[in-house]
Image: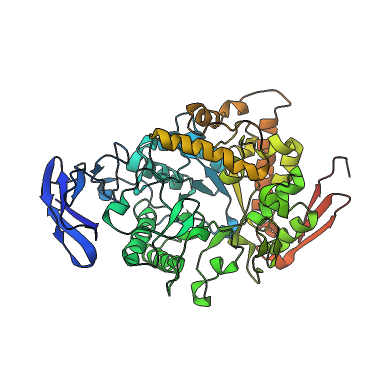
């Protein structure tokens, strides 16, 4: 027996087809419909028939899409999974955390949840505390970054589906690693999103790079907000993730009295208390506004931490000299020093790339509310050739970057393969079934690089080769050559992470205790954190 419920204010008549048999649903208040079907159980396939439309549509809240996002949904019973680790397993605090971002499809040759499990002991031994997984909500095709998800409650079947994801999280907890999921609440993917059939999930009063905005404050927005918040609670409760990373929260448009993020953080806090587990929300934001990580009781959004691109941009430009696009706003050691001391380089200054003033100062906040990194999926994958920092600036510069990231007052984040100077790029790839969509994506990528002055060839995102080139080559660690950059870089990361663990000064998140001296002309910078000094030479000659 299974209860079928769906919010469908656009419906005059609604049926659910369960294993080939249609059943009528009964209207409920607020545009919802409901039916209790005795013959339905775990594994039953179902889809909805809307009004006089005879096309069967998958459930917007489907927990399982075994045949892809366009096909029927399947009933999934979370209680059937046999967890090996206790439900009360707790992640370490962010002040002691080291994050490792990975993409399931390219992290291993097999590209599955189960294959990733075999690499967890390696991450544990390296010194990682949190494994952050790029989005796994079901998307069209077999290849993609995950930010085009459309069935947000259903883990991608090609990766291993619901049970495969649970096995991965269970294995993480089994060896003491926290599990973090990247989720996308600012848009749906361009193909396979059927939410609009049922109700007003998207508004077109504003436009984003992905089309209309998610309806967080218009007519019907209460149920749309409920959709996304229930999604977050599902990942934390039913899959036992320890934290969520919220993609591009600056694209959320919400004029409600209680902002969506505040409501979300409040309900996650309640779940955390109920489950006796620390649960955290981490935002990606380019607003440079500390309101994002200010507690709700002080009028903030209540996020536990956020990514900080200013630190990345400042460090990247000093290492590479690149100055196109948003990098035009950066390039001096003075800016890098400010990022280390004050988080935001732009906290009220004029930004040339934005043609306006940008940001607000961070005051009296710990560094552990902000993430520091030199590589992530965006900063590598949004380059035309997907080059990593070692390929752009050289291995010596990559070592300097690693030292500064891993001794910084921020939560360090490592992108897959960075720790062994992986030679494989991380390119943008997709697998759209519609030929017109494939062409549009390929052409769109070429146009995007105009701002960065790129005139060379842009790998076709829709080509299977672009995906296969992005897979990590773990054999690079097998070579016994004494000059193996991969093994020596891995050892460098291990030593730095051990230093971070062992030195109390590097556990402090007090930004007031971070001192930075530098010489612009001499191209050197020294960061002092109590008894630890990090001496960086950015010049082309010894200092």
Query: Quick check: 26 left or right of 319?
Result: left
Query: Quick check: 421 left or right of 76?
Result: right
Which percent across, then down, holds residue 11?
20, 57
Query: Quick check: 504 left or right of 6?
Result: right
Viewer-side residue, 248 vs 527: 248
Q: Is residue 220 visible?
A: yes
Residue at 44% from the left image edge and 48% from the top image edge: 173
Query: Quick check: 12 left or right of 136?
Result: left
Q: Quadrant of residue 380?
A: top right
Viewer-side residue, 430 vs 365: 430
Query: How are the colours assigned in the image?
Result: rainbow
Quadrant occupied by the C terminus: top right
Q: Is residue 395 above or below residue 508?
A: above
For the image, the number of numbered tags is 0
Which percent across, then down, holds residue 68?
32, 38
Q: Is residue 184 visible?
A: no
Residue at 34% from the left image edge and 53% from the top image edge: 238
Which percent across, then down, holds residue 188?
40, 50
Q: Is residue 206 above or below residue 52?
A: below
Q: Is residue 131 above or below residue 529?
A: above
Residue at 73% from the left image edge and 25% from the top image edge: 482
Which percent across, then down, holds residue 152?
36, 50
């Amino acid at each position: 027996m299974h209860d079928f419920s769906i919010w469908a204010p656009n419906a005059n008549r609604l049926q659910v087809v369960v294993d080939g048999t249609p059943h009528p649903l009964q209207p409920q208040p607020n545009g919802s419909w409901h039916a209790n079907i005795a013959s339905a159980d775990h594994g039953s396939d179902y889809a909805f028939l809307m009004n006089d439309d005879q096309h069967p549509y998958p459930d917007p809240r489907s927990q399982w899409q075994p045949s892809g996002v366009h096909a029927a949904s399947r009933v999934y019973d979370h209680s059937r999974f046999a967890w090996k680790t206790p439900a009360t397993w707790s992640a370490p605090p962010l002040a002691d955390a080291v994050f490792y971002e990975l993409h399931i499809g390219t992290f291993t040759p097999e590209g599955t949840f189960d294959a990733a499990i075999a690499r967890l002991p390696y991450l544990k031994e390296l010194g990682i505390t949190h494994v952050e997984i790029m989005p796994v909500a079901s998307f069209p095709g077999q290849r993609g970054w995950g930010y085009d998800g459309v069935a947000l409650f259903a883990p991608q079947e090609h990766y291993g589906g619901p049970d495969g994801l649970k096995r991965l999280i269970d294995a993480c907890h089994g060896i003491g690693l926290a599990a973090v999921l990247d989720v996308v609440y600012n848009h749906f993917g361009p193909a396979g999103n059927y939410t609009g059939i049922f109700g007003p999930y998207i508004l077109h009063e504003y436009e984003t790079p992905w089309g209309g905005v998610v309806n967080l404050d218009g007519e019907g927005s209460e149920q749309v907000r409920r959709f996304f918040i229930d999604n977050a609670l599902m990942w934390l409760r039913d899959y036992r993730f320890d934290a969520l990373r919220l993609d591009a929260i600056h694209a959320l448009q919400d004029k409600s009295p209680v902002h969506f993020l505040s409501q979300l953080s409040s309900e996650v806090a309640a779940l955390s208390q109920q489950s006796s587990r620390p649960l955290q929300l981490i935002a990606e934001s380019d607003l440079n506004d500390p309101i994002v990580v200010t507690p709700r009781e002080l009028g903030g959004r209540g996020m536990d931490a956020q990514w900080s691109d200013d630190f990345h941009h400042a460090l990247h430009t000093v290492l590479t000299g690149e100055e196109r696009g948003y990098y035009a706003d950066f390039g001096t050691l003075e800016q890098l020093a400010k990022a280390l001391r004050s988080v935001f380089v732009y906290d009220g200054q004029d930004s040339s790339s934005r043609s306006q003033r940008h940001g607000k100062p961070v005051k009296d906040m710990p560094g552990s509310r902000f993430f520091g990194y030199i590589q992530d999926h965006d900063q590598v994958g949004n380059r035309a050739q997907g080059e990593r920092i070692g390929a752009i600036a050289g291995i010596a510069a990559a070592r300097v970057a690693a030292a500064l990231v891993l001794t910084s007052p921020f939560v360090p984040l490592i992108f897959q393969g960075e720790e062994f100077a992986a030679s494989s790029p991380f390119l943008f790839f997709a697998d759209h079934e519609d030929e017109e969509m494939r062409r549009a994506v390929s052409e769109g990528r070429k146009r995007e690089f105009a701002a960065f002055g790129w005139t060379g060839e842009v790998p076709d995102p829709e080509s299977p080769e672009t995906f296969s080139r992005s897979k990590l080559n773990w054999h690079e660690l097998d070579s016994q050559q004494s000059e193996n950059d991969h093994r020596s870089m891995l050892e460098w990361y291990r030593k730095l992470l051990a230093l971070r663990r062992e030195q109390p000064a590097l556990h402090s998140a007090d930004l007031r205790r971070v001192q930075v001296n530098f010489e612009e002309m001499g191209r050197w910078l020294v960061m002092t954190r109590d008894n630890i000094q990090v001496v960086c030479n950015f010049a082309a000659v010894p200092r």
